[in-house]
Image (tube, rainbow, N blue to C red):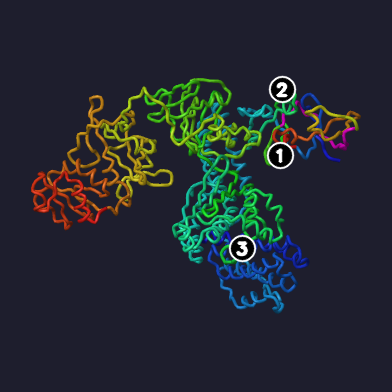
């Protein structure tokens, strides 16, 4: 059974398969990138590496949060490091991934990132693909 | 060359190790095309390198094997066990020779003819007899680039940790002895980082330096003459990139000489110069390094290329007709295709192009072709700048900081200086810096921070022209490792990459060309602006300065490359004169005073177009128009004369004297020297000197030791000139008395020049 990281993202509980997660960090100072799309919050230093911080709410097409979320999941897409801002982290555990139940259609933003469902104590949780939140990659998908 | 040889040995050894599996697989399945291709690539690469390194034995073996493999690839021969054995025997032999070269002992070449003969059809099967080879210890260590990457990233972590420690210690106010220890640590860390950084970076010169020899040899072998132009040798590139670029570059250049450039006879009949032109240039463009190989040969005949492709069964006639011209050009990269009917030892059969593209794409690059049939081919290799150290200037806009590549910056000026104007034409901002008009881009506004009055202007040059970029502050100069930013950031077209400077906060590097594009600047060759306010008289602009000896002097602006402060330690009295170390070079320095007690000295970098000279000054004051009325100096020397500026006497630097006396004498050393002699030398120097110089003579009023004059010019009535044996041209003051004593009227310019040309063999 693959391991999943359970997190709160844009006010929802989601599951992220651990293979997509490089690390989980608290982001420090974020340097804005003028004229970039709004889901690029900016750049941050992670040890000696520069990561691109993604405002996940904006990437999902939701109104932006209060900007206080500083915890992030680091993922690597095409050799670039991205920090996906999350509200909070809950748990890491092994679950079985099952496809979305027949007839369930997700909202626009979530539909792009949703990959299936895991079940935690009877509660269904949406498993998401982090790379789908990366601008440019998402558009191409 | 030794380095290259070591590289070759190490590379061949590595490929051989990797290839051993393939060879065994090919043995069991000789029809496997993929295995065949990789063995073919190996012998092809060995052949290329051998030609490059002058290893004829290896070249012969690999060429023979390549021929056979090419025949197999084209289906002319079938790979039976005998053929496979023969090829493998050659591959083994290549391995043996390489080990022998490395160990430095001789290996007798008996049996090599046999090996080559075994490749022919119907020959006897041979038994491979690879003896166990003793490997000699290597002198260098080949490191995995991953390891260097980890070292680099660990180093950066260390710097950041040091910075944080320093910050904390400042806040706590600790013991000075601890601070001293930290200082030592900082120095070591900085030095280490420099070293670690350098392990990955190399000037592309390492790649280019071997080219002239290779081009010459290749061209000579083909009976062609080629003039090679190399540009941009000092572009720095990741060491790995350089290694990866070597083979493609060699292949492409050989192809250009072999297939592109025509023989002398063909060139003559095509109306071209007999000597072929080949240019190899490297430059940085945005976040890429571009290497361009251009020739003025025959280009690619796409029609013939298409026919070949159809003949080889790679495309159908119909598919070909549907293709665009560019797509047809790209067919050159098809594996196993030849545009050349004659197979030569130089570049084989047009193969290599698929290998070249595979190699370049492997490092995330791409190849572009610009074909002009009959006129030449330009091949551009774009490779990413994954790890490139750049010299940058930091600029501040509101609260944000950005880096600008130093090579893009022409100059930096402060708004408010007398020679700087900012005007509004309609809603468009325009800057006038001295006599130059250029568009102005407000960086803050462009980045969406709102408008503010510009404080500093950074004049940047992009292809086509220059523009002024208004920023709030100009910060330090820093050497930074620029890495490509994420696609979402690059998509703005504003940034060339990202970096992590010592501050520990990420910083973006601006793409000056992208900014110009985004701001909608359009450059024509000359920016012409209507102007009715400014005075029309275009005088010579000159820099007014206080010299080291306290005298106020002036020098025309056009010869000043730049003004920069240098540490006094960069100035040395060495090899008989003052010299200044700049970057990697040493240039002569002129100082008319002392700089004792100063830590740094402002130096004017003067340039006469080819030769560079440093001139140490006290302080630059202002830029003014050079008055026309010059009172000539009594003697020739560093001062040409005196002018009056605002009622003050200002000495004018004699540039000609400076360059003729101090610049490296290779400049115009072949020009005939014209010696002006006599008591009337003031007239001679002020009136005659410009005339003579314009006519291509060097002019002197006294000979330096070791110099001989080509001709002596003197006034009539002077006593016989000095012991110098040079012919004499006499001038007289009166227009009458035409030519009786051989003298020439002093204002008879054509007559004078003709006489000089006759006597001095001048120009």
Query: In the rendered image, is residue A31 in sight?
Result: no
Residue B433 lies left or right of residue B80; in this view the side is left
Whether residue B500 is visible: yes
Q: Residues within 10 Å of mark 1 (few under 14, many from 20)?
A: some
In percent of the image, x 64 and y 62: which residue is there? B13
Query: Could you tell me residue B492's position as x and y percent?
Result: 61, 32
Tell me how far mark 1 sits from mark 2, CA to CA: 23 Å
Callout in the foreground (2, 3): 3
A140 or B390: which is nearer to us? A140
Residue carrying label 3: B349
Q: Which residues are magenta?
A: A84-101
Residue closest to the eye, A92 or B3: B3
Q: Chain of mark 1?
A: A
Looking at the picture, does residue B429 appear above or below residue B753?
Answer: above
How many angstroms separate mark 2 from mark 3 (CA)? 60 Å
Q: For mark 3, name the chain.
A: B
Residue where numbered disc 2 is placed: A64
Q: Position of residue B606 (x, y in %)?
A: 35, 40
In the rendered image, residue B622, in percent from the top left (x then y), is placed at: 33, 28
Q: Chain of mark 2?
A: A
Seen at 30% across and 35% down, the residue is B555
Q: Residue furthest bottom?
A: B124
Real-space Cα distance between discs 1 and 3?
40 Å
Q: In the rendered image, which quarter is residue B159 located in?
A: top right
Where is mark 1, residue-wise?
A77
Residue for point 50% across, 21% down: B427
Element carrying mark 1: strand
């Amino acid at each position: 059974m693959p391991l999943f990281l359970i997190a709160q993202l844009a006010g929802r509980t989601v599951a992220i398969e651990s293979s997509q997660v490089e690390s989980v960090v608290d982001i420090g100072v974020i340097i804005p990138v003028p004229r970039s799309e709004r889901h690029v919050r900016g750049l941050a230093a992670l040890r000696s590496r520069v990561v691109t911080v993604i405002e996940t709410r904006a990437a999902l097409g939701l109104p932006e949060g209060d900007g206080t979320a500083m915890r992030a999941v680091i993922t690597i897409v095409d050799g670039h490091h991205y920090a996906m801002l999350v509200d909070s982290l809950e748990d890491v555990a092994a679950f079985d991934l099952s496809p979305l139940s027949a007839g369930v259609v997700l909202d626009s933003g979530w539909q792009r990132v949703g990959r299936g469902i895991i079940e935690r104590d009877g509660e269904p949780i949406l498993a998401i693909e982090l790379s789908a939140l990366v601008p440019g990659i998402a558009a191409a998908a | 060359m030794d380095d290259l040889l070591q590289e070759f040995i190490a590379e061949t050894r590595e490929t051989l190790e990797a290839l051993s599996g393939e060879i065994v697989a090919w043995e069991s399945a000789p029809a496997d095309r993929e295995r065949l291709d990789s063995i073919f690539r190996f012998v092809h690469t060995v052949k290329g390198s051998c030609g490059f390194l002058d290893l004829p034995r290896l070249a012969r073996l690999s060429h023979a094997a390549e021929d056979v493999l090419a025949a197999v690839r084209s289906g002319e021969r079938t790979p039976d066990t005998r053929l496979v054995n023969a090829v493998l025997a050659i591959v083994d032999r290549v391995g043996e020779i390489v080990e022998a070269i490395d160990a430095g002992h001789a290996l007798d070449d008996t049996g090599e003819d046999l090996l080559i003969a075994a490749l022919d059809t119907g020959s006897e099967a041979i038994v491979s007899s690879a003896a166990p080879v003793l490997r000699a210890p290597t002198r260098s260590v080949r490191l995995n680039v991953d390891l260097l990457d980890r070292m680099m990233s660990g180093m950066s972590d260390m710097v950041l940790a040091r910075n944080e420690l320093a910050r904390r210690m400042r806040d706590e106010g600790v013991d000075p002895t601890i601070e001293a220890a930290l200082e030592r640590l900082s120095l070591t860390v900085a030095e280490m980082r420099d070293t670690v950084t350098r392990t990955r970076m190399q000037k592309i010169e390492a790649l280019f330096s071997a080219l002239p020899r290779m081009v010459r040899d290749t061209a000579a072998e083909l009976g062609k003459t080629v003039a090679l132009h190399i540009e941009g040798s000092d572009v720095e590139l990741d060491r790995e990139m350089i290694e990866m670029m070597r083979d493609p570059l060699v292949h492409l250049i050989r192809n250009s000489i072999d297939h592109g450039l025509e023989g002398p006879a063909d060139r003559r009949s095509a109306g071209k110069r007999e000597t072929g032109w080949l240019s190899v240039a490297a430059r940085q463009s945005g976040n890429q390094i571009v290497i361009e190989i251009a020739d003025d040969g025959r280009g690619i005949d796409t029609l013939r290329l298409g026919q070949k492709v159809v003949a080889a069964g790679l495309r159908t006639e119909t598919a070909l007709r549907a293709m665009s011209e560019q797509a047809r050009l790209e067919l050159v990269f098809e594996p196993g295709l030849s545009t050349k009917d004659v197979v030569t030892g130089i570049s084989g059969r047009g193969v290599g192009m698929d290998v070249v593209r595979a190699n370049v794409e492997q490092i995330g690059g791409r190849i572009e072709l610009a074909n002009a049939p009959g006129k030449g081919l330009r091949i551009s290799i774009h490779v990413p700048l994954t790890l490139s150290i750049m010299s940058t200037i930091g600029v501040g806009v509101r609260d944000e900081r950005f880096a600008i590549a130093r090579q893009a910056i022409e100059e930096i000026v402060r708004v408010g200086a007398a020679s700087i104007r900012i005007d509004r034409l309609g809603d468009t901002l325009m800057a006038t810096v001295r006599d130059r008009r250029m568009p102005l881009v407000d960086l803050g506004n462009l980045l969406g921070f709102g408008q503010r009055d510009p404080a500093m202007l950074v004049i940047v040059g992009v292809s086509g022209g220059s523009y002024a970029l208004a920023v709030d502050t100009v910060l330090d100069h820093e050497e930074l490792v620029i890495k490509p930013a994420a696609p979402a950031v690059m998509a703005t077209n504003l940034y060339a990459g990202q970096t992590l400077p010592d501050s520990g906060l990420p910083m973006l590097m601006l793409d000056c060309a992208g900014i110009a594009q985004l701001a909608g600047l359009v450059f024509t060759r000359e920016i012409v602006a209507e102007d009715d306010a400014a005075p029309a008289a275009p005088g010579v602009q000159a820099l007014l300065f206080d010299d080291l000896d306290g005298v106020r002097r002036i020098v025309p602006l056009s010869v000043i490359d730049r003004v920069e402060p240098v540490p006094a330690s960069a100035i040395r009295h060495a090899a008989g004169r003052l010299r200044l170390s700049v970057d990697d070079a040493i240039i002569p320095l002129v100082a008319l005073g002392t700089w004792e007690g100063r830590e740094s000295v402002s130096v004017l970098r003067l340039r006469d177009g080819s030769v560079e000279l440093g001139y140490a000054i006290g302080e630059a004051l202002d830029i003014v128009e050079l008055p026309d009325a010059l009172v000539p100096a009594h003697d020739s020397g560093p001062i040409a004369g005196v002018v009056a500026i605002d009622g003050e006497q200002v000495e004018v630097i004699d540039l000609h004297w400076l360059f003729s006396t101090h610049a490296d004498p290779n400049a115009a050393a072949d020009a005939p020297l014209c010696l002006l002699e006599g008591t009337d030398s003031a007239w001679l120097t002020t009136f005659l000197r410009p005339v003579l110089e314009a006519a291509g003579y060097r002019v002197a009023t006294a000979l330096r030791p070791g110099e001989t004059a080509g001709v002596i010019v003197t006034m009539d009535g002077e006593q016989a000139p000095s012991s110098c044996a040079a012919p004499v041209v006499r001038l007289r003051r009166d227009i009458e008395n035409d030519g009786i004593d051989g003298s020439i009227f002093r204002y008879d310019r054509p007559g004078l020049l003709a006489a000089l040309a006759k006597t001095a063999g001048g120009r």
